[in-house]
Image (cartoon, rainbow, N blue to C red):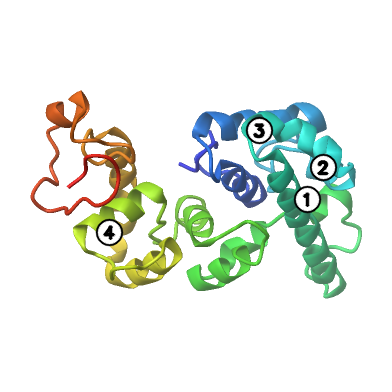
Amino acid sequence: RIEGCNEEEPALIDAIIRARLSAGTNDMNASRAFMGILKKFGRCKPGSGIGIVHWEAVRLAPLEDLYEAIKTGGMGNVKSRSLKAIIDMVHEGNVVRQKKGEIPSHAKGIDLLSLEYMRSFSKDEAFEKFVTFPGVGPKTAACVISICMQHNSFAVDTHVYRICAWLGWVPPGTDRDGAYAHLETKIPDQLKFDLHYLMIRHGRACGRCKGNASSSSKDWDDADCPLEGLVKRKGGKGRK
């Protein structure tokens, strides 16, 4: 499931926007921001490939209107600009495709804001395309590719990164993007999605592996961590 996304297989334009909204915040804030866009700009019919939001209305609206719609989700100034830029890039790309005859000549407006043609892309092609969008990094791209496009890709969020580093699965000093590049080649395809999901659940819930875990806390003492003895925890108050 994409953070902030309630549909199992949303239109790709919805998925990339929702994933962008989830950056640096929690599911609740991401959902609040997306619902703000829906309320402000209106809804399209689900299942059409153009998304459930009237993205053409977003594209034509002033930046300030988009900011007002998403500001309760946090980082409104940064995210409104990147979302506007993403939508503009999708539109411009589809105008080019239309000139090449890949889209009917009569298509206009909302019909030029679909990314569904990318479902025929390979994993690598989709990744290279998604990371050209402002604010979309390897983690966001990998999430959409894995969850919405059914490709095997190992998204590395903050929890996955922390646990993999403690397990010694990535070279010391490797940043999160580097960890993705490393782990994508090392983890068997059939394990990538389930392992990603399990590490997120564990990283959020384990009293010893949470981001703010402390050896002086009750959660630490109560935790029955299945990774105990396998991880070398570093950083944070009280960690070994």
Circles 2 and 1: CB atoms closer than 8 Å: yes
Residue tagged 2? 58
Circles 4 and 1: CB atoms closer than 8 Å: no
Circles 3 and 4: CB atoms closer than 8 Å: no
> Marks 4 and 1, Cα distance to the nearest angstrom?
35 Å
The amino acid type, in three-letter code, at marker 4 is Ala
The label on residue 19 is none
Q: Which numbered disc, 3 or 2, marks the residue that appears first in the sequence?
A: 3
Q: Is residue 201 above or below residue 192?
A: above
Percent x, y for residue 36?
A: 71, 29
> Marks 3 and 1, Cα distance to the nearest angstrom?
14 Å
- In the structure shown, which secondary structural element does the residue marked by tag 1 occupy? helix
Residue at screen point 73% across, 43% down: 77
Q: Count neighbours of disc 4 (C-alpha within 10 A) and say few if under 14, some if 14 to 19, many if 20 or more.
A: many
Q: Which of pointers 2 and 1 indicates the residue nearer the eye?
A: 1
Residue tagged 4? 165
- In the structure shown, which secondary structural element does the residue marked by tag 3 occupy? helix
Q: Count neighbours of disc 3 (C-alpha within 10 A) and say few if under 14, some if 14 to 19, many if 20 or more.
A: many
Q: Nearer the viewer, residue 93 or 37?
A: 37
Residue tagged 3? 33
The amino acid type, in three-letter code, at marker 1 is Lys
Residue tagged 1? 84
Relative to 102, 204 lies left or right: left
Find the residue positioned furthest to the bottom. Answer: 100
> Marks 4 and 2, Cα distance to the nearest angstrom?
40 Å
